Amino acid sequence: MSTDPAQHPTTLYEAVGGADALRRLSERFYEAVLADPLLAPVFVDFTPAHVDHVAVWLAEVFSGPAGFTAEHGGHQALLRAHLGLGITEEQRLRWMELMTAAVEKELPDDALLRRRVVEYFDWGTRIAKDVSASAPGTDLGDPGPTPRWGWDGLA
């Protein structure tokens, strides 16, 4: 596919292949995470529902259905879920390695699409790491609506 965004579907959600593709991405990623000695401890409270929640979050971020906001509490809930995790930079970088590998296996063979998706994860994991340093129950203020990520990055 072209590296020109004008040659791509309108949204990243459409370009990745929609909800089914994001669910496969999430499944592949969490299989690797739960087997990884550096990351598994961060996900000690992991449940299979987490895979679905991440796929629904990504759908909304990539301009698909707004199911995370409607059903799971939106941006505030996602940030609160990271409070107290104490994510290290080493863990963040390993998370990025595993997610990049999952992106390469599960998303269409399109360099620009994959780059934009990985750029979102890099941006998001930096926020998650920062938030994770605060104690559970910390008042995060109003983070605003769920962010949207597109062909040009943060919308």
Image (spheres, rainbow, N blue to C red):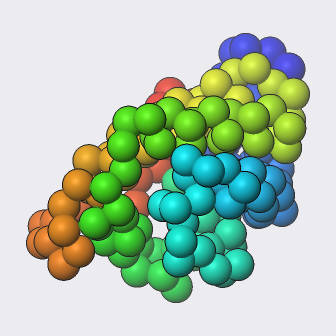
**Residue drawn 43% across the image and 45% down it:** 124
Q: Quadrant of residue 63?
A: bottom right
Q: Position of residue 64 (x, y in %)?
A: 63, 59
Q: Nearer the viewer, residue 64 or 44?
A: 44
x, y percent for residue 137: 19, 78
Q: Is residue 113 left or right of residue 75?
A: right
Q: Is residue 114 left or right of residue 79?
A: right
Residue 90, compared with residue 49, is above or below; it is: above
In the displayed structure, would residue 52 be above or below residue 2? below
Q: Residue furthest bottom?
A: 71
Q: Which of the 4 image quarters holds residue 100?
A: top right
Above or below, 5 relative to 82: above
Q: Is residue 65 left or right of residue 122?
A: right
Identify which residue, 99 or 153, lies in the foreground: 99
Q: Which residue is depicted at the point 52% across and 61% down?
A: 41
> Going 77% across and 58% down the picture, which residue do you hit?
31
Q: In x, y percent, where is residue 138?
A: 14, 71
**Which residue shows up at 76% across the image and 42% down it?**
102
**In which quadrant of the rendered image does the N terminus lie?**
top right
x%, y% of residue 18? 78, 56
Q: Quadrant of residue 28?
A: bottom right
> Can see residue 71?
yes
Most extreme residue toward the front is 37
- Quadrant of the rendering where the C terminus is positioned: top left
In the drawing, does residue 144 fall left or right of residue 121? left
Depth check: give the residue in front, 2 or 101. Answer: 101
Q: How many marks?
A: 0
| Residue 58 visible in the snapshot | no
